[in-house]
Image (cartoon, rainbow, N blue to C red):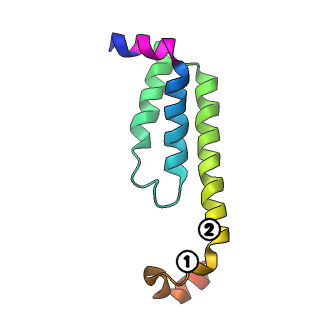
């Protein structure tokens, strides 16, 4: 554990890159259910507590990743809305999709 903390203290940008990537992936539609973001964010909190990462920088990077993932999902849905309705799982429930919209 000490070796890991030392490595992160010397290369915090790698840990922040992981935080950004996990926050982004967890915010993507359908992919977010497969990403264990809670474990990574808990670990980032532990690294903040240990002094290896700055709290405000880590929060900003995580928020930026989450907003980016939400924006990508939104744009994908906006651009592919018509094609999505033709997919077999969604075509069966067209009235429900119209009601939800």
Please tell me which residue is depicted at 53% across the width and 19% down the height of the picture: 12
State whether the magenta stretch is mostly helix, strand or loop: helix
**Residue 4 position by quadrant:** top left
Q: Using the image, determine if residue 2 lies above or below residue 26.
A: above
- Of residue 79 and residue 96, the one placed in the foreground of this image is 79
Give how far across and how far down residue 66 sits, in percent: 59, 45
Please tell me which residue is depicted at 58% across the width and 79% down the height of the picture: 83
Element at label 1? helix
The residue beneath circle 1 is 84
Query: Of marks 1 and 2, which one's residue comes earlier in the chain?
Result: 2
How many residues crowd mark 2 within 10 Å: few (<14), some (14–19), many (20+)?
Answer: some
**Residue 31 position by quadrant:** bottom left
The residue beneath circle 2 is 77
Give how far across and how far down residue 60 sits, in percent: 65, 32
Please tell me which residue is depicted at 62% across the width and 64% down the height of the picture: 76
Give how far across and how far down residue 2 sits, in percent: 35, 10
Whole-angstrom CA distance, mark 1 to mark 2, is 8 Å
Report the magenta residues as a range: 5-11
Report if residue 65 lies within the magenta region: no
Quarter containing the N terminus? top left
The mark found on residue 76 in the picture is: none
How many residues crowd mark 1 within 10 Å: few (<14), some (14–19), many (20+)?
Answer: few
Q: Using the image, determine if residue 51 lies above or below residue 16.
A: above
Q: Would you say the residues marked 1 and 2 are in contact, meaning their CB atoms lie under 8 Å apart?
A: yes
Q: Using the image, determine if residue 50 lies above or below residue 79.
A: above
**Residue 81 position by quadrant:** bottom right
Please tell me which residue is depicted at 39% across the width and 53% down the height of the picture: 34
């Amino acid at each position: 554990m000490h070796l890991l903390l030392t490595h992160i203290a010397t290369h915090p940008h790698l840990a922040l890159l992981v935080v950004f990537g996990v926050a982004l992936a967890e915010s993507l539609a359908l992919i977010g259910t497969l990403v264990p973001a809670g474990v990574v964010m808990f670990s980032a909190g532990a690294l903040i507590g240990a002094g290896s990462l700055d709290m405000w920088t880590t929060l900003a990077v995580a928020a930026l990743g989450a907003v980016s993932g939400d924006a990508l999902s939104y744009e994908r849905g906006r651009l592919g809305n018509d094609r999505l309705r033709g997919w077999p799982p969604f075509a069966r429930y067209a009235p429900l999709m119209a009601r939800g919209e």
